[in-house]
Image (spheres, helix red, strand yellow):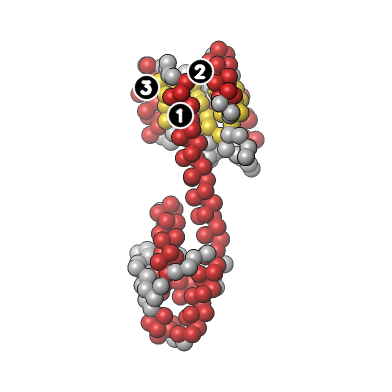
């Protein structure tokens, strides 16, 4: 497995070197950047393959502050969590940055183990999000592959209707409903109507949008 990268962005060379040594000694790939623009130039080159990484960003830097660097970084839609490194007087700014999308902040001086633990938590959260995003993409692709009739049957299933009711509503035979139902389950990688509703419910929650052809969202499926 490729080691996770730790991007250390700080205009203080002593802090950069110390943090790089710490994370290298813990088995990570530490990369240091002396300024926000230098780091952003590198980040803009990663948009096709971000990999697994965390950014440690000093909140006070020259010529571009950590907050300004973070605002530019957010426009890249990167999956890398950002942890701000702050002085005592910068805590309010760091809290505002977290509200604006940063993963967390750590106030100087901090203990090495505390920093490493926080970074590992951020990496775990990013890994989980990556897996969820991958599952959502696969489900969306599968939904797009459904035929019009399969989408109609899917809508009926999500409203909790049984095969006989679906057949009556759509003017087809129960055997035809079973055929379409089996195709839907196969394409979406599920084994029951309950699992189907759960998968689409999670997708809907992630996207904040209704499931396809399902007014009001999924109901309790029947005929599982």
Residue 76, position as x, y percentages in the image:
55, 38
- Determine the secondary structure under disc 2: loop
In the rendered image of this protein, does residue 201 appear above or below residue 30?
below
- The residues tagged by marks 1 and 3 sit, at their Cα atoms, a distance apart of 20 Å
Q: Which mark is residue 117?
A: 1
**Residue depicted at x 41% and y 80%:** 163
For label 3, count other residues whose C-alpha is less than 10 Å away and answer few (under 14), some (14-19) or many (20+).
Answer: some
Q: Quadrant of residue 174?
A: bottom left
For label 1, count other residues whose C-alpha is less than 10 Å away and answer few (under 14), some (14-19) or many (20+).
Answer: few
Residue 34, position as x, y percentages in the image:
59, 19
**Residue depicted at x 40% and y 66%:** 194
- The residues tagged by marks 2 and 1 sit, at their Cα atoms, a distance apart of 25 Å
Q: Is residue 205 left or right of residue 141?
A: left
* Observer able to see residue 4: yes
Q: Which mark is residue 61?
A: 2
Closer to us: 56 or 18? 18
- Determine the secondary structure under disc 1: helix
Q: Which mark is residue 2?
A: none
């Amino acid at each position: 497995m490729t080691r996770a990268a730790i991007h250390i962005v700080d205009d203080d060379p002593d802090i950069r070197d110390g943090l790089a040594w710490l994370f290298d000694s813990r088995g990570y790939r530490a990369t240091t950047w002396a300024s926000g623009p230098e780091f952003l130039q590198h980040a803009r080159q990663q948009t096709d393959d971000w990999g697994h990484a965390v950014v440690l960003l000093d909140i006070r830097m020259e010529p571009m502050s950590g907050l300004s660097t973070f605002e530019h970084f957010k426009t890249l839609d990167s999956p890398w969590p950002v942890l701000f490194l702050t002085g005592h007087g910068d805590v309010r700014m760091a809290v505002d940055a977290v509200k604006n999308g940063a993963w967390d902040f750590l106030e100087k001086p901090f203990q090495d183990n505390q920093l490493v633990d926080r970074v590992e938590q951020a990496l775990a959260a990013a890994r989980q999000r990556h897996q969820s995003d991958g599952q959502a993409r696969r489900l969306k692709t599968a939904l797009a592959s459904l035929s019009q009739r399969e989408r109609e049957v899917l809508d009926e299933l999500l409203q909790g209707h049984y095969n006989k009711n679906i057949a009556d509503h759509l003017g087809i035979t129960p055997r035809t409903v079973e055929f379409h139902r089996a195709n839907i389950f196969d394409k979406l990688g599920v084994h029951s109507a309950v699992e189907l509703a759960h998968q689409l419910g999670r997708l809907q929650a992630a996207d904040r949008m209704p499931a396809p052809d399902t007014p009001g969202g999924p109901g309790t499926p029947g005929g599982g």
